[in-house]
Image (cartoon, rainbow, N blue to C red):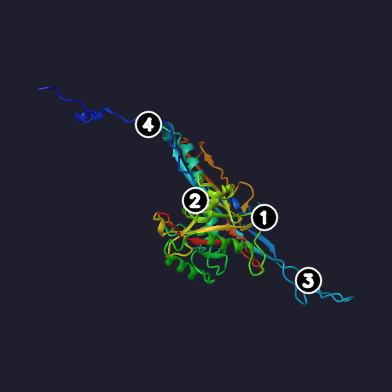
Amino acid sequence: MGAAKILTTAPADFADRQQKYFSRQLLKELIYNLRLGTFGVAKELPANSAGDTIRFFRPRRAKKGTATSGPRALSESLPPDETEGAPIGYVDIQLKQRGDLSSVSDITRAVDLFDTLQINTKTMAADAALDFDFVCSHAICSSPGVADADGTPNSIPAAQATMFNSNGSFERFAGVANTLNSANDFATLAALSNSNAKFTRAFHIGCVTRLKGVAGKPGVPMINGKYMCGLPPEIMADLRQEATWIASAIYNNNRAAGTLDQWVEFELDGCRFFENQSPFIEQSTGYGIYAPSDTVSDNIYACLYLGAEAFGVPKLSGMRAGSDPKAPSMIILDKADKADPLNQKTTFGWKAFYQAGLLKTNETTDTPRLVVARCKSTFV
């Protein structure tokens, strides 16, 4: 009888003699493409100003004259009645402090294969950046004061106005004739099939036209000569299948409208699209409540058409109450003190004192500087 074969599975104790080799090179982490927060109007509240609220002002828009006020015909040698001065509207935004905290033991730092502190502080900074984008999208789309579907508290207080239930033509719903009742139009959208409620060029043109100004009303100011629109990747996928975009990409080789071999920002109808990977997402049963699902067909996406000064992101000046939310600074405590005399723990975290808010004032002629366009996706 021949000798028994020796394999990695036999004899049984062979497995006890093996160990895994750990690569010291970390694989690249998943990265969000965060853009929304960069379009907010950044203002600083001076430190020690005896308040935590900043007020933004905007004068009334230009108006057509009447027989007795504004531009009108004048009688020779007869001075006209004086026109009332231009009223100035305002909107108040109260700042809130946000942050996160963690720690690592001295033994972990001494024996871990990786630089635990460096990895975790880098990841926490990414958390802060994502949080900033979500605060901005909630300030635009959410039902203020209402928690997300998973129970996460809403960063926008109930007293602060958003586009939720705006009941106007600056909140639009794909495949739905605008009735100026936002809740009803959302319910109608939710009942549509994904193909009937998807993003189309006609829907896009309607949103841009609204920003351009209708019924003789002035248009919303642009950002460097363009309107900007943040689309989730799923909605971008539907748009890239639109016949108009395909024709431009193939026949005209129009790089301003994108090409077939690119997945990049592009322009269409005077609007520049950018990819937004942290969109506001709802479910059919929760208008204004953030509730993303891994099942894409269940989601209703908010696409944001932005003009100049659409929303603000005020922060407190200085670093005492917190750093800039767009570039959070990590606070690392790694020295012995009375609470940790043997320096057994390193604590690290960040904080920011800011808020995001819709810049629509109480002046009667003021209008939103953006359009919230809700739609579904056919992506599966």
Q: Is residue 156 visible?
A: no
Bin the neighbour count of mark 3 within 10 Å (Cα to Cα): few under 14, some 14-19, many 20 and up: few
Q: Residue furthest right?
A: 77
Q: Which residue matches tag 4?
A: 22
4 and 1 marks in contact (CB < 8 Å): no
Label 2 vs label 3, nearer the camera: 3
Q: Amino acid at mark 1?
A: Ser
2 and 3 marks in contact (CB < 8 Å): no
Helix, strand or loop for disc 3: loop
Bin the neighbour count of mark 2 within 10 Å (Cα to Cα): few under 14, some 14-19, many 20 and up: some
Q: State the separation of the CA atoms marked 2 and 1.
A: 37 Å
Q: State the separation of the CA atoms marked 3 and 4.
A: 78 Å
Q: Residue at x 59, y 59 (%)?
A: 357
Q: Amino acid at mark 3?
A: Pro
Earlier residue among tags 2 and 3:
3
Q: Which residue matches tag 2?
A: 277
Q: Amino acid at mark 4?
A: Phe
Helix, strand or loop for disc 4: loop
Picture coordinates of residue 229, whole percent (x, y): 56, 55
Q: Which mark is residue 362?
A: none
Picture coordinates of residue 276, whole percent (x, y): 52, 51
Q: Could you say which is closer to the camera, residue 187 or residue 280?
A: 187
